[in-house]
Amino acid sequence: MKTNFIYKICTWVGIFGLLLSASCSDVLEEQPRSSLTPDFFQTEAGIMGGLTAVYSHLRYYYGPISTLYRGTNGTDECTWGISQDGGGQAMDTYGTSITPNTGSVSDIWNRAFIYINTCNGIISIGAENGMPASLLAEAKFFRAHDYFLLVQTYGGVPLDLGSGELEFNTTPVRTAVRNSVQEVYAAIFKDFIEAISELPDAGRVTGAATKTAARFFLAKAYLTYGWWLERYSQSDPGGKSPAQYYQLAYDTSIEAIKNPAGFGLMGTFYDVNLAANDRNKEIILYADHNDNVTFSESGNATFTDTGGTDGGMKENRSNFAILCNFEQATGGVEGNIIRRVATQDLGRPWSRVAPTAGALLKTFANKTEDSRYDGTFQYTYYANFNLEEPGTASKQGANGLRIYPGDIAWLFLGDDTELNNLTLVGDGFYLPGKAYAVWTPSSINRTRYPSIWKFGPDRDNKTRSGPWNAPSTRPFPIAKFSEFYLIAAEAAVKGANAQGGYSARELVNVIRARAGVWRWDNNNRVAKVEDNSAAMIAATPASITIDYILAERSREFYAEGGRWYDLTRTGKLEEYASKYFICENSPQQVVATEHTRDIKPYHYLRPIPQSQLDRMIGTAEEKSAFQNPGY
């Protein structure tokens, strides 16, 4: 029987200038180790312990609030919410707000090199001791994964951590040299290509790396590098042109689509994100979590709150980051109508991140045929005050009407048709004859907005005594099979020669056709067996553009942390993110106003963390040269 890696978590502590020495508990034999030395990787048990730690480190990158601050805030998708902690607003406003001291830009750098070095040890020492190639391939996969994340975020980064390029280092060093972007990508390609050759079709345990996962990241790396060569007029040391890399991205994606090895599309978009379907066949790679307090960061045995030594840096807090303050009363309506519960539609309203009005109006313009709006957002909130007040039959609503348990209490409309008909009472909007509060896309603010449903918690205890404030124990998606179609389509738009039946439009339409299939109306809580795939396909333009693919990517992967990377890859950051619309938290503001962001060309990379520069020896000029321009 397969087991989930999350049940074997290894905690690492690093001290580093650039390279770190780390400590790990051997998860297989429970033997504490104060440092990683070459003998640790000479046995299969040591290799397994190292790999377990490498899998667990994905939780630093995918799911914490920094995931959304780093990759979602400051784009056309999202802006900061009313409860943001300063980091969210800094990442959103650009200008001089993003600095080498901004926490959300440091997390990748501060973690990646620890685990890259672990992978270096597994690969080199494991090979010398005859360890199985498939296990070493998992380390190659993650070394390439981390370097790909680093090069997209910071540009060229060091391949030599102190003992030579891609060599295992046991001695902390305080010097570092950044390799070129081209050199880093060459290392990434080599590792992913070897991983494809040596990894199995099916993971050795649930959630482990596979050929399909390696193909996914190789295709995306090819695509990203092709864009980089073209946009910055750079030459490839291997002599390939951007067009050749687009072709490689296309071919690699199509190979995976034709040979899915057990992966594939779910029947409906709703089923991709339904908590009951977690770890489904569409999720190629995820950062896993569970309820076992032995492995929780906070160590809270009741899971009633958050905390922990890393301040939530490994916890999946996506479940309450983009969750509006639905507990707040509105003018003229009795308070406490909607209570937090650990169910996918509710949870803890933290309000750190908010959608933009443009995302709701334009990206998700089609809300009737396309199921992705309903399968992404919670826009209808129902009264559940009876969970805590069982003796209360009803509460006062708007227009002299009563609200009963199960009635709609808040509703976010899909368009602005009713905008001029809204009546302001205190700080709430109402329509004639309706007992519930109403907002349109252009009247949302940083407190009240459609929340993200797809990240919502889903616990065994769904009552008011349940742990509604706890971080999510659901896996956070990293790579989805559906993205293969959009990677290949993007490569085709960029000039890759398409195979018959796999043109850009045909690839996009696979995703759009699935989006048109409904089996459940999530917000209305009723079955909806409806197939709008023909209409969705008919609405696809004859000529696919990069802008159209970016729109499809947002509809498919909204708020999953990849939007900043999509916009920087394609050179669209200023065009898409330099302005957005939302209301401020003023009861008198009914229509969203324009907000601008001071985006400069240097914002296509994040700054090297100040902590890295402080730990390095060297002159001020040398450290300045190590930093990315503009910071």
Image: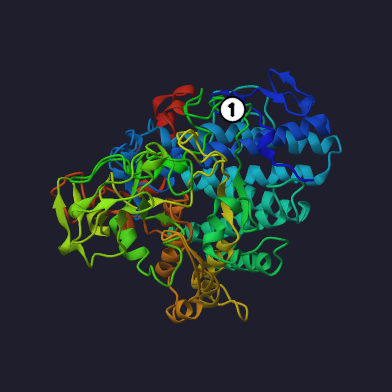
**Drawn side of residue 342 relative to residue 53, left or right:** left
Residue 262 image point, x, y percent: 72, 61
Residue extending farthest left: 588
Position of residue 134 relative to residue 268, above or below, is above
The reply to whether residue 120 is visible in this rendering is no
Q: Residue at x 50, y 67 (%)?
A: 490
Q: Residue at x 70, y 35 (%)?
A: 52
Residue extending farthest right: 130
- In depth, the one of 435 and 58 nearer the eye is 435
User: What residue is disc 1 on?
Assistant: 19
Q: Residues within 10 Å of mark 1 (few under 14, many from 20)?
A: many
Residue 23 image point, x, y percent: 66, 22
**Drawn side of residue 62 relative to residue 568, left or right:** right
**Drawn side of residue 614 relative to residue 160, left or right:** left
Residue 87: image quadrant is top left
**Amino acid identity at mark 1:** Leu
